[in-house]
Amino acid sequence: MNTNTIVPARRRKHGRCRKIDHSPWESCLNIRDASAADAADIVAIYNHYILTTTISFEEESVSADTMAGRIADIQGGGHPFLVLTEGDTLVGYAYATKWRARRAYRFAVESSVYLQPGNGGKGHGAALYTALLARLADDGFHMVIGGIAQPNPASVALHEKFGFRKVAHFSDSGFKFGRWIDVGYWELKLKDA
């Protein structure tokens, strides 16, 4: 299994990179499996969303050690945890976790993708989801579920771009920053069982 993927930038002669497809930026992107060494960069991204948004329902910042444990648990459970780097900078990550604990759910996963603040609109989320969904399909998973705190039009657009369809909406199911938050669920069937 190849754990390093250059997407979607392509090399020019002399080792330079050309523009990413559908993007005005010139860049070299690398998507690879996360490691414990990435934990500090991942929490720098994730803690922003915990402390300033309702995208994550966690309310306390996460330490690098805690994140390293989560990475190990996710990967140890047979699920992908991927990071996207641009040069030497980690700019985003995506992973999948088991949907539910009971064995009959073993082919269903819940997906998550997070980008460094200010990196939206550059194709990074799409690059991560392309790699994550391909890995999930290759690994034999059947259903991918995305839970999205509402409103979040950017996340909804990303999921629907990949063919996810909305299947549920739960009102007032989270409470953060002194207000109730709705959550919608989208699903994508990867292949027939």
Image: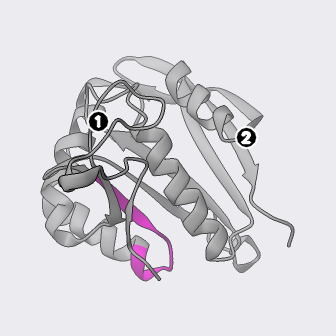
User: In this view, which residue lies farthest toward the front?
Assistant: 13
In the displayed structure, does residue 58 sit left or right of residue 167?
left
Relative to the observer, which residue lies in front, 105 or 7?
Answer: 7
Secondary structure of residue under mark 1: helix
Q: Nearer the viewer, mark 1 or mark 2?
A: 2
Counting from the top left corner in percent of width and height, residue 73 is at 37, 75
Vertically, is 79 above or below 52?
below
Magenta residues span 75-84
Residue on which disc 1 sits:
50
Out of 18 and 180, give the one closest to the viewer.
18
> Is residue 156 within the magenta segment?
no
Distance CA(mark 1)–CA(mark 2): 27 Å
Is there any visible trace of residue 164 in the rendered image?
Answer: yes
**Looking at the picture, does residue 36 appear above or below residue 11?**
below
Badge 2 is on which residue? Answer: 163
Left or right side of 5 for 92: left
Model colouring: one colour
Residue type highlighted by circle 2: Gly
